[in-house]
Image (cartoon, helix red, strand yellow):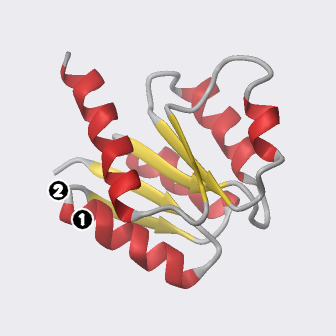
Amino acid sequence: MHKCLVVDDDQNMLEVLAQCVQDLGYEPIKAEDGDQAWSAFLQHRPAIVISDIHMPNRNGLLLFKDIKESDPTTPVILITGWVHYKAALNMAPPRPEAFLEKPFSLDQLRQAIEGIRLKQSA
């Protein structure tokens, strides 16, 4: 089973994300902040990462940068309720494979993950 790292400092959102990826056939690896996420990424080398942007100890943009420097092929979905971060993501590559603004539906998340799966299998 492929692993999916889900990262959010909101415990309820973290559980929803974990359940969603589990329903899609991934083993969820959960982290509550950027530092935990970076350690989990290095330990588990997940097939996909879904991360909030605004969180303690290493925000999602720094985590994204570190992941892409470590392994540019790892797909990352960034999520946030802070819309101003979207402009920062459009400045220079690399860019996340998907960007979801909170609130988003689980169907939107599923579509983003399925889109990544299709690209990976091509």
Q: Nearer the viewer, residue 76 or 89?
A: 89
Q: Are marks 1 and 2 in contact (CB under 8 Å)?
A: yes
Residue drawn 40% across and 52% down?
A: 108
- Looking at the rendering, in which quadrant would you find the C terminus? top left
The image position of residue 34, as x and y in percent, is 68, 58
When asked about the image quadrant of residue 107, the answer is bottom left
Residue drawn 80% across and 22% down?
A: 91
Q: Amino acid at mark 2?
A: Gly
The image position of residue 67, as x and y in percent, is 59, 35
SS type, badge 2: loop
Q: Amino acid at mark 1?
A: Gln
Q: Is residue 37 above or below residue 121?
A: below
Label 1 – label 2 distance at C-alpha: 5 Å
The residue at which mark 2 appears reads as 25
The answer, for residue 87, to whether it is visible in the render is: yes
Residue drawn 66% across and 66% down?
A: 33
Please give the label number shown on residue 22: 1
Q: Is residue 111 above or below residue 52?
A: above
Residue drawn 64% across and 39% down?
A: 64
* Residue 43 shown left or right of residue 99 in the figure: left
* Residue 45 shown left or right of residue 41 in the figure: left
The answer, for residue 45, to whether it is visible in the render is: no
